[in-house]
Amino acid sequence: MGKLEVIAHPLIQHKLSILRRTDTSTKAFRELVDEIAMLMGYEVLRDLPLEDVEIETPITKTVQKQIAGKKLAIVPILRAGIGMVDGLLSLVPAAKVGHIGMYRDEETLKPVEYLVKLPEDIDQRQIFVVDPMLATGGSAILAVDSLKKRGASNITFVCLVSAPEGVKALQEAHPDVDIFTAALDDHLNEHGYIVPGLGDAGDRLFGTK
Ligand code: PRP
Ligand code: URA
């Protein structure tokens, strides 16, 4: 079973509370998503492999550590996942970025895929799929399906707010995928929205409603 980790750092919890508020502006929402993604990145990337490197300090030659330069890819689920990309890229600027476009049919709540554009060597990359919301889990599951169909095998899912229903569904569908979330909320309402949640992440990020 994939690991579920709630990254409950006080800075993240504080920023997330502001993010959730109805009266938070589009501008502030965008900035907060970016900041929280960056703060989460510190934990999400903690297992990056290191290698030895010989360097010279003013005092002596010494063998120290550097990031092994393993190939990474950040894959946002459009639209809302886009808001999390820059925060992670600020930590790993050389990572490649793929995009998976998906929206939830409002009646069935089933995800509909409309775009997949990935680095050519996606099968060799360590992939971080990002989306602020893990609700029913349908979008995350389909995104991981899509990546695996293209040969990807090393996949981690990173979100801001998750529902227990979505976590369970993703863990059952893809037990090899670890999940990092900033908050595990209470439940889904009858419209498939996370409670207490933050509303529609895409609309709040882009100001479309
Ligand atoms: C939201 C969110 C996730 C999805 C989560 O996207 O960003 O992708 O819903 O719900 P699920 O776990 O039930 O699949 P939405 O469909 O609203 O598309 P948008 O980002 O383009 O607004
Ligand atoms: N998608 C969102 O943007 N918000 C939710 O609460 C559920 C799905």
Image (cartoon, rainbow, N blue to C red):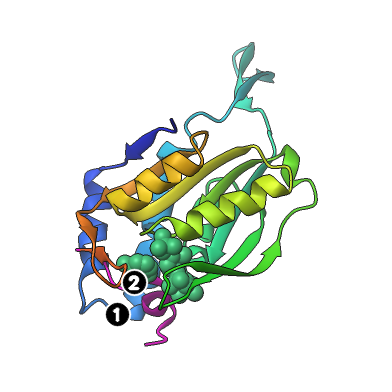
Q: Which residues are magenta?
A: 196-209
Q: Residue at x 53, y 59 (%)?
A: 85
Residue in the foreground of this view, choosing between 39 and 73: 73
Tell me, yes or no, whether the highlighted magenta stretch contains residue 157. Answer: no
Residue in the foreground of this view, choosing between 131 and 115: 115
Q: CA separation, marks 2 and 1?
A: 6 Å
Q: Position of residue 62 (x, y in %)?
A: 63, 12
Q: Residue at x 49, y 55 (%)?
A: 140
Q: Position of residue 58 (x, y in %)?
A: 61, 20
Q: Quadrant of the C terminus?
A: bottom left
Q: Quadrant of the N terminus?
A: top left
Q: Quadrant of residue 92?
A: top right
Q: Which residue is mark 2?
A: 29
Q: Is mark 2 within 8 Å of ligand 2?
A: no
Q: Which residue is mark 1?
A: 25
Q: Is 28 on the left-hand or right-hand side of 71? A: left
Is the residue 33 above or below the residue 74 in the image?
below
Tell me, yes or no, whether the highlighted magenta stretch contains residue 202. Answer: yes
Q: Is 70 on the left-hand or right-hand side of 90? A: right
Residue in the foreground of this view, choosing between 148 and 117: 148
